[in-house]
Amino acid sequence: MSARPLIIGEAPGKHGDASKPIEGRVGARLAECAGLPFDEFLRTFDRVNLLQVQPQDSGKGTDFNVKAASCVAGELERTFTPGLVVLLLGKRVAAAFKQTNVEYFRWFALNHARAVVVPHPSGVNRWWNDPANELQMIKFMHSLVKELR
């Protein structure tokens, strides 16, 4: 595979840097799940956020502007090349790509790319509260890294 896999997130975290997408806690959690040292994770995956500014806090997370994110998603999708692997971080990112009712870890075609929705790795996502779920993510990420090598 010529292109590095692309991880698409929502927006920078509260203390995140828009110029360094998915390099904070979310990136650290993904690297850990993949079994990669953080610097190797950064070299293995390209990363981008749909929004460049963190959305307003809603009390239970953030109010993600799906309409604005959808505009960016459409532009980004047009750049996808055959064989590109794309990880969409969570159902809100999936919705920005007009993907609804998707199941985690199920591959599908997204323009020319091979895409998958994985649980958003933020601390707000209750999916992570079940150790069996976390193990499922670890198995998925390990399998993906093995496939990429």
Image (cartoon, rainbow, N blue to C red):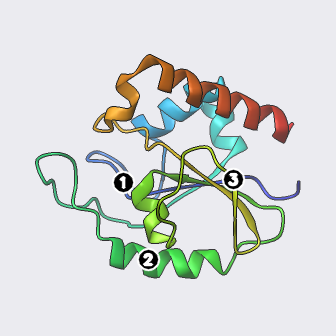
Circle 3: residue type: Trp
Residue 3 percent coordinates (x, y): 80, 58
Q: Residues within 10 Å of mark 3 (few under 14, many from 20)?
A: some
Q: Nearer the viewer, mark 1 or mark 3?
A: 3
What residue would you read off at disc 1?
12
**Mark sitting earlier along the chain (2/3):** 2
Which residue of the protein is positioned furthest toward the front in this rendering? 101
What residue would you read off at disc 2?
70
Circle 1: residue type: Pro
- Residue shown at the point (13%, 54%) measured from the top left: 58
Q: Disc 2 versus disc 3: distance between alpha carbons?
A: 20 Å
Residue 117 percent coordinates (x, y): 56, 51
- Residue shown at the point (16%, 45%) measured from the top left: 60
Circle 2: residue type: Ser
Looking at the image, residue 66 sits to the left or right of residue 107; the answer is left
**Mark sitting earlier along the chain (1/3):** 1
What residue would you read off at disc 3?
107
Quarter occupied by residue 70? bottom left
Image quadrant containing the C terminus: top right
Q: Residues within 10 Å of mark 1 (few under 14, many from 20)?
A: many
Q: Is residue 59 above or below residue 123?
A: below
Residue 7 percent coordinates (x, y): 59, 52
